[in-house]
Image (spheres, grey):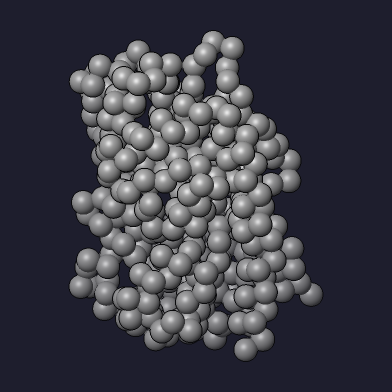
Amino acid sequence: MAKVVAHSVNPFLFSTGSWVYSQLESLREWQPIVVCKRRENQAEYPLDPVFSLTELSLLAQLRERLGRRVSRGVFPFMRRAIETMEARILHSHFASQGWTDLPLAAACAVPHVTSFYGADIWKNSRSPVWLARYAELFVRGKLFLVEGEAMRAKVISMGCPPEKVRVQHLGVKLEGTVCADRVPASDGLVRVLASGRAVEKKGHEFAVRVIARARREMPNLRLSLMIIASSKPELDRLAALHELVRAENVGDIVDFPPPRPYAAYRKSLYDYHVFFAPSQHAKNGDAEGGAPVSISDMSATGMPIVASRHCDIPEVAPAGVSGELFDEQDLEGATRALLAVAGAPQSWRRFGRAGRAHIGSEYCLSTQAQRLEAIYDAQAGG
């Protein structure tokens, strides 16, 4: 019989959650199942089986909510799913979900693993309520997975015993991903890409200010902002970003390619010469975690990287290996770094190939899946 691991993430799965899905889909020795309150984007993330509250009848949902009250935090359908499928591990994605799942793990008597990803530590660490909840989670949870050493240090600083924290990199798929040397375009333009959700931590406004300064020395620079915005705050931020482009007089060199499905997005990466990732700590405390998976995606295709020394980015894109780094929110330093890479096409091949090799060594999806399964084996065996 296959070894079964129950994953808890809500909803399953948000539109930008490909990096969560890839962890589940790449497992080979362990069969993943999912328990959640709501299922979304099923065509894009067609995992099976998924046990979702909202896929039950309205009467059954009412019974489940009453049952959760009686059992002090456990949806009966989730407990039945875990027990019926004989899951041997409960893996919660995001620390906030991990705290919510404490009663479920206890009711099913299975080891409880929780993955931290970013806002769940950097933003919530400012909340006395969440700090108290995390203190409980650190005592009752068995193991905590983080993306890198900066993230590990942050979790430990919040009171988690060091022996309970393990670095587990988020992998990207290298099989079928071509590493292409970037070469100068026939039109002489150097195309820079920045991408991500329309949130402050991505530093998109900063990117516009940098490109406005860099063009003074390099008029052939172009910047594409491939931004995802769905909520009202995100749409408002995107509108403000368009206004900033006008205010900085860079409308002729900045464009906004529309979001596209993940496969089409990856294919489009070969149209760009340099990836720019000026991530920063947001005013509300939010941060990457971690590092944007987009950096790993770009390096996997052989694209040079220019990024901030934010959280675990220096681990994913080492300075002088994948490209160049600059201090967070250092406008002049970021401009110099971008010019140093974008203005030296003779370095693109070296940065691209070294970056791809680094991703292959430390962030390959199949390798990380094997390491995750080894973690499951150790926890279940214990």
Q: Position of residue 307 (x, y in %)?
A: 42, 43
Q: Residue furthest toward the right?
A: 1
Q: Is residue 173 above or below residue 86?
A: above
Is 246 placed above or below 17 here? above
Residue at 49% over, 16% down: 189
Q: Relative to 345, say whether 275 is above or below.
A: below
The extreme bottom residue here reads 382
From the image, which quarter does the C terminus lie in?
bottom right
Q: Is residue 123 left or right of residue 195?
A: left
Residue 111, percent from left and from top: 55, 82
Q: Residue at x 44, y 33 (%)?
A: 340
Residue 350 placement, left or right of 151: right
Q: Position of residue 248 (x, y in %)?
A: 23, 21
Front residue of 185/177: it is 185
Quarter in which the N terminus is drawn: bottom right
Residue found 37% across the figure and 77% down from its top: 156
User: Visible in this render: residue 96?
Assistant: yes
**Residue lying at the far top of the rendered structure:** 187
Q: How many marks?
A: 0
Q: Residue at x 41, y 30 (%)?
A: 339
> Between residues 2 and 304, which one lies in front from this camera angle?
304
Can see residue 198? Answer: no
Q: Position of residue 116 (x, y in %)?
A: 43, 65
